Amino acid sequence: MTWDYSDMKKWGWQKHPRGAVIPQAGTADDYKTGGWRSQRPVLDKEKCINCFFCFIYCPDTAIVVEEEDMKGFNLKHCKGCGICAHECPKDAIAMVDEIKAKQQDEAASA
Amino acid sequence: MQRTVAVVGTDAVAEAMRQINPDVVPAYPITPQTAIVETFSEMVADGKVESLLINVESEHSAMSAGIGAAAAGGRVMTATSSQGLALMWEMLYIASGLRLPIVLANVNRSLSAPINIHCDHSDSMGARDSGWIQLFSENGQEAYDNTLQAVRIAEHPEVKLPVMVLLDGFIISHSVDRMDFLEDEKAKKFVGEYVPENPLLDAKNPVTWGAFDGLYGHYFEFKRAQQQGMLNAPAVIKMVGEEYGKISGRPYGFFEEYQMEDAEFAVVALGSAAGTIREAVDNARCADMKVGMIKLRMYRPFPAAELVQALSRVKAVGIFDRSDTFAGAMGGPVFVEIRSAFYESAVKPLMSNYIYGLGGRDLSFGLIEKAFSELDDAARTGVVKEKVNYLGLREGEVE
Ligand code: SF4
Ligand code: SF4
């Protein structure tokens, strides 16, 4: 079953699942917690030893790992809590100001 | 054949629980409820039921564990009293908000302070807006019957709300009463198999319970949907009560009308007081007093329209409340609600409130007769002398 709740904001009270149950797994994927971020993690791959501490500790599953290699962050879900930076044994993650990072992104893409 | 027994009220509830055989019973002891779970835990230890009994560290935990177990897909029951119900407070709202059909027997007892272990309805009256269905019992038989019916009502797909079965502390819970128990087969067939909705333990269909609603904000819609369960409940309670009548010979409705056909005045009461009042009505009838009684069984949802219909024929009504609202001069909760129910009615009787029995104060025939004679006067003269009366209160002189 795929639960289509794309227009949930328009639903009347009769349409919601009883007792506020979410009748499908994985809907957190649609919930873009990245918008909460005021600090952004930045990876220094030179220092990283692929220990995956960051992967284990990240509360939003926002550490991207491919073929046993730590690749960076899923910024749609990373809420900038800084836990990964705190736990990294090699100080390979720095937290930078999100607004500045965004401005730099924009300047780079312009 | 039903089994005729003489047992205390707590054993009557425990016997219903044995026949229901719930999946999970998380419980914490409190006087006068303790005996229910004590008897039930013996049944668990003796292998007479398959229920998982969880000894928790508080009533807050009892209801929390119950909510978890019910969300997991289990049929859940528990029991409490007084401070225990008060400690469950925040979880009561979560059980009803999540639409979990948990059944709770509450043995009515006063709330501290001062500390008192005896009967009044302060505990469950405080929970009257917690979204639970509330069914009052007059005696052990009704506590047993209500417990069996509660499961059916709670689990009905049109309702899906938790149900509180109420029985008066000590007066019912610790008094030996003659009563009839259904045969196990019949009771089990009546209660039926539980088919949970969206159980957490169904690993093939993973779901989330109790998620945060805040950012999109649909709380309002969920609360309206919850009210719909209450609005649907009367029809289900009636249907279940009639069906239960067919198998037991004891049909149930929203309330019982006693000697109401030609009554000129009436009283409304909940719980064990109705038994004493019924006798007092019989005595008064011998003395040519035209009095009737309504014994209210279904307190939540509140059968407003039906009560108005039943009471609009009499000239005066005395509402008996075993708790107070502390809202100033408004009177007890049953009084406030019956008065409100009559607001649109063109024909309405005179109404007065009798707050009685707080902290287990005895309701004697003498006190009921006093109320009858005041109501009789009101019916004759068209004047209510005192709107809110404290029946049985000691009123000494102040030096
Ligand atoms: S900052 Fe927090 S949310 Fe973002 S990747 Fe690190 S641990 Fe995860
Ligand atoms: S915790 Fe640090 S070193 Fe370990 S994988 Fe993450 S970034 Fe690399």
Image (cartoon, coloured by chain):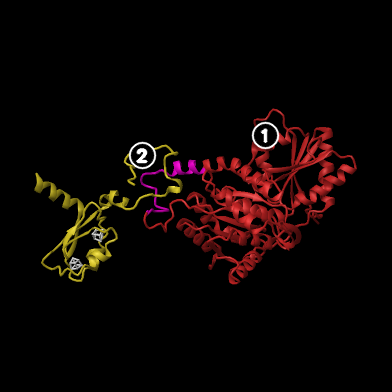
Residue A85, position as x, y percentages in the image: 22, 64
Where ligand 1 lies, by image quadrant? Answer: bottom left
Identify the magenta region: B205-226
On screen, residue B181 above or below A50: above
**Mark 1 or mark 2, whichever is nearer to me:** 2
Tell me the amino acid under the disc marked 2: Lys
Does the segment drawn in magenta span residue B101?
no
Q: Looking at the magenta stretch, what is its main secondary structure?
A: loop
The residue under label 1 is: B342
The residue under label 2 is: A9
Residue under disc 1 on the same chain as residue under disc 2: no
- Look at 64% across and 66% down and name the residue there: B34
- Look at 24% across and 64% down and name the residue there: A55
Which lettered chain is shown in red?
A: B
Label 1 Cα neighbours within 10 Å, binned few <14 / some 14-19 / many ≥20 = some
Ligand 1 contact, mark 1 (Cβ < 8 Å):
no
Chain letter for the residue marked with disc 1 in the picture: B
Name the image quarter holding residue B11: bottom right
Which lettered chain is shown in yellow?
A: A
Separation of residues labelled 1 and 2 (CA atoms): 39 Å
Question: Does residue B117 appear left or right of residue A28 in this picture?
Answer: right
- Look at 42% across and 39% down and name the residue there: A15
Q: Nearer the viewer, residue B354 or B295?
A: B295
Question: Does residue B9 appear left or right of residue B235 in this picture?
Answer: right
Tell me the amino acid under the disc marked 1: Phe
Question: Does residue B117 appear left or right of residue B154 in this picture?
Answer: right
Chain letter for the residue marked with disc 2 in the picture: A
- Look at 26% across and 49% down and name the residue there: A35
